[in-house]
């Protein structure tokens, strides 16, 4: 894995900062080429008195071991997965662990998320973590954070921005999740026809784009498969139900596979199929594939209602905290860290791509 050159720059900047005393760790984390700017600022302030510089340096949390302030621009509260991810950040970035966490629930609204990040910059937080609602539109605000000398970690999802504009990435490979779902379906169908409906995640979200890309790649290898339709359910239960209701109107009796990009959409789809008297799961007419493998999603998988559930691990905060600690200490850190996933299938199904669910597995799950 690439070791970020920032560590060297950081160490240099830390020295520069302690001499220039340009304030908190965020300045100290600025790459070396930024440090002279801070020096210029001091010069511009008519050579701020020496004691101010010393005070500023003392304030640098790195020096005094003070609280590390972290801003987390969270996607929203759209799903059980998101709830587990938020709780995990609150558990890890706690006061007793030496942090002050500002977690902003951006309610799946891209404009709100950009504003939250800009507020973190204004507040001069030490670190900014972003779980991007959409992949696009990040270059400008990331440049602003970099100009302010605040390290940025992209978490959970991916963005379409040059990697030089942020400092680290921690998340899951959602394309692989889509490939796993497709490979499992091919193994399960064993050459039988599939007429597939897909309830996608939020429009523009890398998790939705990745799962679609991976599944489509496998689907393209199977001429006996047909994707009848696909529509976004926005990663919510209501969205899953609404999309499934419209699919039933258009395709009743024509489909035998429903792919839901997360568990909450699957719960909505099951409600819609129940209302229409359509059976699903291992003993039903329709195969359900879901993603996330949250607790309730795995309960449905254990009960045979969901045939295959591909995990996407929301427990990522400790990995992010480790990167922040390394940045704080001027150590080299992983630029990219993948959080691992696996897949689960209903009892009675044996698969080379997934683990057959048991009560013990469910009891042992962290979320
Ligand atoms: C995946 C994550 C997705 C989950 C959904 O990494 O971003 O967002 O699959 C959540 O449940 O809403
Ligand atoms: Zn095939």
Image (cartoon, grey):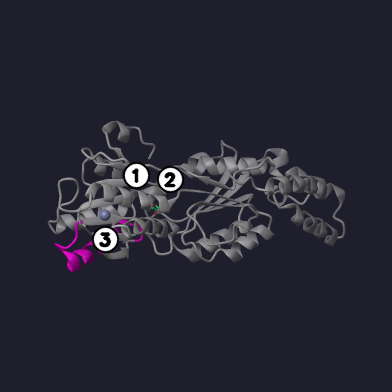
Q: Quadrant of the C terminus?
A: top left
Asked if the residues shown at circle 2 and circle 1 are in contact, with their CB atoms under 8 angstroms apart, the answer is yes
- Quadrant location of residue 331? top right
From the image, state whether disc 3 or disc 2 is nearer to you: 3
Magenta stretch: helix, strand or loop mostly: helix
Disc 2: residue Cβ within 8 A of ligand 1's nearest atom: yes
Residue 217 in the image: state x and y as whole percent: 37, 58
Q: Give whichever of 241, 349 is nearer the camera.
A: 349
Q: Residue furthest bottom?
A: 250
Residue 34 in the image: state x and y as whole percent: 75, 56
Disc 3: residue Cβ within 8 A of ligand 2's nearest atom: yes
Residue 85 in the image: state x and y as whole percent: 44, 46
State the residue position of label 2.
314
State the residue position of label 1.
294
From the image, state whether disc 1 or disc 3 is nearer to you: 3
Q: Magenta residues? A: 234-256
Name above or below for residue 289 compared with residue 225. above
Q: Residue at x 41, y 60 (%)?
A: 209
Which mark identifies residue 28?
Answer: none
- Left or right placement of residue 8 versus residue 51 in this view: left
Q: First in sequence: mark 3 or mark 2?
A: 3
Q: Give whichever of 101, 161 is nearer the camera.
A: 161
Q: Residue at x 61, y 50 (%)?
A: 127
Q: Residue at x 18, y 57 (%)?
A: 273
Asked if the magenta segment contains residue 273, the reply would be no
Q: First in sequence: mark 2 or mark 1?
A: 1
Q: First in sequence: mark 1 or mark 3?
A: 3
Element at label 3: loop
Disc 1: residue Cβ within 8 A of ligand 1's nearest atom: yes
Asked if the residues shown at circle 1 and circle 3 are in contact, with their CB atoms under 8 angstroms apart, the answer is no
State the residue position of label 3.
223
């Amino acid at each position: 894995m690439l070791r970020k050159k920032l560590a060297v720059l950081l160490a240099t900047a830390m020295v520069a900062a302690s001499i220039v005393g340009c304030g908190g760790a965020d300045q100290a984390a600025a790459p070396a080429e930024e440090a002279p700017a801070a020096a210029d600022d001091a010069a511009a302030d008519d050579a701020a008195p020496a004691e101010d510089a010393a005070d500023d340096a003392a304030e640098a949390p790195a020096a005094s071991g003070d609280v590390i302030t972290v801003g987390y621009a969270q996607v929203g509260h759209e799903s059980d997965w998101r709830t587990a991810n938020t709780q995990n950040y609150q558990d890890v970035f706690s006061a007793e662990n030496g942090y002050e966490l500002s977690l902003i629930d951006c309610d799946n609204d891209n404009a709100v998320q950009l504003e939250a990040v800009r507020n973190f910059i204004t507040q001069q937080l030490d670190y900014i973590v972003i779980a991007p609602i959409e992949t696009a539109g990040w270059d400008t605000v990331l440049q602003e954070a970099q100009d302010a000398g605040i390290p940025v970690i992209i978490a959970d999802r991916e963005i379409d921005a040059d990697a030089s504009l942020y400092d680290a990435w921690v998340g899951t490979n959602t394309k692989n999740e889509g490939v796993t779902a497709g490979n499992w379906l091919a193994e399960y169908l064993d050459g039988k026809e599939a007429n597939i409906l897909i309830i996608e995640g939020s429009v523009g979200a890398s998790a939705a784009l990745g799962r679609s890309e991976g599944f489509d790649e496998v689907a393209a290898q199977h001429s006996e498969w047909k994707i009848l339709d696909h529509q976004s359910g926005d990663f919510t239960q209501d969205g899953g139900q609404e999309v499934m209701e419209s699919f039933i109107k258009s395709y009743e009796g024509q489909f035998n596979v429903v792919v839901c990009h997360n568990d909450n959409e699957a719960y909505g789809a099951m409600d819609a199929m129940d209302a229409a008297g359509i059976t699903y799961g291992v003993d039903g007419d329709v195969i359900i594939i879901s993603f996330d493998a949250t607790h309730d999603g795995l309960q449905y998988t254990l009960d045979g209602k969901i045939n295959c559930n591909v995990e996407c691990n929301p427990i990522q905060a400790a990995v992010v905290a480790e990167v922040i600690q390394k940045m704080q200490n001027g150590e080299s850190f992983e630029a990219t860290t993948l959080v691992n996933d696996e897949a689960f299938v209903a009892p009675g199904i044996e698969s080379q791509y997934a683990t057959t669910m048991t009560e013990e597995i469910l009891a042992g799950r962290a979320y």
